[in-house]
Amino acid sequence: MECDILIKNIGQLLTIPSKNGPVINTNRESLGIIENAYVSIEDGKIKDIGRGSKEIAAKKTIDAEDCIALPGFIDPHTHLIFSGTREKEFSMRIRGKDYLTIMQEGGGIKSTVKATRLASKEELFSVSAKRLDTALSWGTTTCEVKSGYGLSTADEIKMLEVASLLQRNHTVSIAPTFLGAHEVPEEFNGNKRGYVDLIIYEMIPEISKRKLARFCDVFCEKEVFNRKETEKILNEGLKHGFHAKIHTDEFYNIGGTELAEKVNAVSCDHLLCTNDKGLSSMKKAGSIAVLLPGTNLFLMKKEIPPVDKMRELTVPIAIGSDFNPGSSPVIAMPVIMSLSCLLYGLTPEEAIVGATINAAYAIKEEGVIGSLEEGKLADIVIIDSKNYEEIPYWFAQNRIVYVIKGGRVVAGKKKFQTTED
């Protein structure tokens, strides 16, 4: 019986298997490399994987011509949906102002909130779909998407409804996250408690009722939401069926990661200022450390996450783009992989694992994506390279030839011939 698609003559196939949880102590063996490999696909899923030039009947055959194939990239942290740009803040930072100062002067998140509130659902969908097109061209097949630029019940719902439209109408899969606790809106200046109550008693129940999000996130940071407020919001999210995520330790350590065990956090993200106590809490909770090197680059921050301590404590590492208009307008995951090596000292193996299977764990999709194994979705990228170490090495060069999503070729340069029976 013939399969739908056969990918043959793969020089290096990175299967990145993970039967027992996220990958830690990452090395070459973690990549599950098969040389001179093939992959057969049936009904959008991986049917078989093997070595050599086994003859398999197929409706369509892709000759990879000795290139690399690996799982489609998963971006576990984005702020994809927004209106407006913040290039003026870029100039302000170049001239010496830091991120928190810009926020206090009315820039930052609040400026994007104003533009996003004014934008229609149709406008947000259109611009966000174009951004996803770009991400897809760089190999991203699944993307976490946060709200957080609405900061009112109606506008947070609007953003999450756009995420739902993207899920139904775009090739890239979407993992939606409610981030109403991203900032305190101007109408609640001097009344943060009132805004926290709005999140807890109105936003969370309504978003849960409408089934618009899978995760609840909080920006636990100085000048934003403190540890007590964060715990209160996330616990309410848990009551309504959301999984917890925490934006924390980006500028200061106020104990955000220490909440990981209390709220069973799926991931803790940023982590530039995390201490041993926070990492121990994450380890006990099984949380993924989602590192965001694009933000380091764009904010010109010298602090880096305690990667060596994460390795020592075996806290699994994923990487994400943190794509947003203010602190990381970078949506290409291969660029983020390069930056994770150059700025944080991750190995190429850690970067690859961090953008695939560990990123899948960070959005609780490890059962269907993130690795190439029989029965999983056929989300695959083929890259014009001979050795996996080239993936982060070719900085900001898009060498992707094919992007395959659910067994369909959906993007890529299409350099190679495809044959159909």
Image (tube, rainbow, N blue to C red):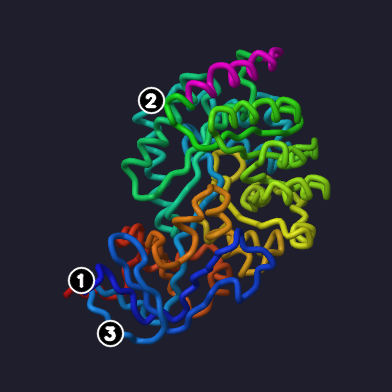
Amino acid at dot 1: Lys
Whole-angstrom CA distance, mark 2 to mark 1, is 43 Å
Report if the CB atoms under discs 3 and 1 are less than 8 Å apart.
no
Q: Residue furthest right?
A: 276
Question: Residue 10 shows which numbered tag?
Answer: none
Query: Which quadrant, please, contains the C terminus?
Result: bottom left
Amino acid at dot 2: Ser
- Local secondary structure at mark 1: strand
- Local secondary structure at mark 3: loop
Query: Which quadrant, please, contains the N terminus?
Result: bottom left
* 96 lies above or below 56: above
Which marked residue is nearer to the observer: mark 2 or mark 1? 1
* 315 lies above or below 261: below
Q: Quadrant of residue 113?
A: top right
* 59 lies above or below 168: below
Whole-angstrom CA distance, mark 3 to mark 1, is 13 Å
Question: Residue 59 shows which numbered tag?
Answer: 1
The image position of residue 62, as x and y in percent, is 30, 74
Please tell me which of labels 2 and 3 falls first in the chain.
3
**Segment tinted magenta in the rendering:** 189-207
Residue underneath mark 2: 120
Residue 27, magenta (yes or no) = no
Judged by its main secondary structure, the magenta piece is: helix
Amino acid at dot 3: Glu
Report if the CB atoms under discs 2 and 3 are less than 8 Å apart.
no
Local packing at callout 2 (Cα closer than 10 Å; few below 14, some 14-19, many 20+) is some
Which residue: 69% across, 43% down?
94
Residue underneath mark 3: 55
Please tell me which of labels 2 and 1 falls first in the chain.
1
The image position of residue 292, as x and y in percent, is 63, 50
Which marked residue is nearer to the observer: mark 2 or mark 3? 3
